[in-house]
Image: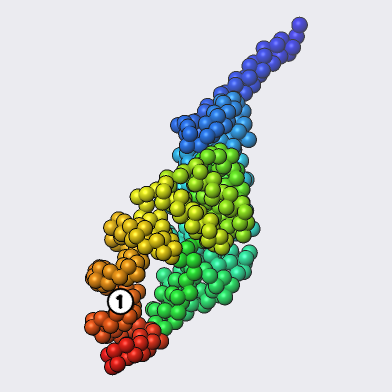
Amino acid sequence: MSRSPQRWLFVVPALVLSGAAVFGWRSYSARRAWRELRPPVPALLGEQAPGCDAHIASCAARLQAYPPDHAALAEFAALCHANGRLDEAAAAYQALIALEPAEPRWPHRLAAILSGFGRLDEARPLLRRTTVLAPTQVVAWLKLGEAELKANALPSAEAAYSETLRLDPANAHALVGLARCDLQSGRLTAARSHLEQSVRAHGDAASAQSLLAEVFERLGNSEAAALARSRVANSGHYTEPADPWLEELNAVCFDPYTLLTAASTAVADGEPRKALPLLDRALQLAPRDARLHRQLAKTLAVLGDSARARTEAAQAVAFDPKNDAVRLDQIALLRRFGDEPAADQAIAEGVAACPTSTALNFEAGVLAANSGRLDDARRHLEFSWRSRPDQSAPALELAKVLFSQGRDADGFALLEEVLTRFPGENAALVILIRRGLETRDPRTAAWLALATERRAPADLLAELTTDYRRRFGTTP
């Protein structure tokens, strides 16, 4: 045998062994890297999120194998994120970013978690990465602009908001964001222009109107500032921009309270239809939760579905009969749909079930007074007034009952007490004046003078003054 074939007898096995060693080392390194990258399993959620623990455990079991199961990792991240296990969700997103660097959802969601923790310096690069991976996603640019503005990086924030407007020219959130940048840079006229654009496109935007009031104030136009404040709608509720990549998580949320919160937010944002699937899912998880039936009733009422709303309100009462807030919502809903007899019945049942409820005693007192049952009315209203002396309404209704029973001295004393506790309670003053006119009480002139001093409406003052002249024969 020649030397050359003999040499190959040694070389080939050596090459094979060498290749196997390299492959083995790479496989070992990859497995070790995956073990280090693999997210930890969160603590059990238990009844807080019924059924969630089993889903997380199933995903975690699939993640023990190699190579990594990307689908299991994505599901694990979403489950942890949607159900409040944010540290584990963040670790899972970091692994997903390493395994699927072209998917924009992963840095976007991780940035949302980090921003919520106040870790903006870590979130901002992730948000920039999201806009590179998904340059047409409006919410990605909005979130980047918000983060840059909070970090006082005004040029970057302006660039992000400007790109948002290029994609969505009337976007109210971007216009308000640019106005905030203008304000920080002292550009009041530019801020006013952006805010007026936002108001023209979305007149009920509370954030735009509030900020516009501030701009007008700083420009020295207090009248325009007051007008802007008066136009703040929905009690100043600020609406977050829609984020479809975060809203997707609701499909794997097993926490009924989280779903309830999301549904309440949707209704407050003026999107009640978005609340329905959230509440349906929550009720599948917790069918006897009165809070869910209560919110569903309110949502259906907004949508005009009176029959289902009444059914859900009754379900809420049945599942939590001692909760006066649930009963008060049912009463309000029945009145909203014009069924006063049913509302009256709900008041009677409510005060029987919750005899120490201040609000239900007040409702029962007013109902009894309107029905001529003055002793019952006085009993309920006295309880309500004693229980909540920081609320004037029970005292006002009680004073009317006392006057109807001929107990004028008690009624006057009660209203004087209300005026002492609540100097600005003009309704008490008007009741005093009207009763003083009916009984020719000599103190009426002083009460009328106080109403004049407090600048009561001119037409009301004119009416009361005319009645005084007619009753007393002189001008006060």
The one nearer the camera, 9 or 333, is: 333
Q: Residue at x 74, y 12 (%)?
A: 5
Q: Residue furthest right?
A: 1
Q: Which residue is mark 1?
A: 432
Residue 251 visible in the displayed image: yes
Q: Residue at x 48, y 41 (%)?
A: 84
Left or right of 141? Residue 462 is: left
In the rendered image, the vertical position of residue 418 relative to residue 116, given as above or below = below
Name the amino acid type tagged 1.
Answer: Leu
Left or right of 4? Residue 268 is: left
User: Where, by quadrant of the figure, is residue 456 drawn?
Assistant: bottom left
The one nearer the camera, 48 or 87, is: 48
In the rendered image, the vertical position of residue 230 relative to residue 140, given as above or below = below
Left or right of 125? Residue 138 is: right
In the rendered image, the vertical position of residue 239 relative to residue 310, given as above or below = below
Spot occupied by residue 169 in the image (x, y as percentages of width and height): 62, 69
Visual colour scheme: rainbow
Q: Residue at x 50, y 33 (%)?
A: 39
The one nearer the camera, 289 or 229, is: 289
The quarter of the image holding the C terminus is bottom left
The one nearer the camera, 61 or 419, is: 419
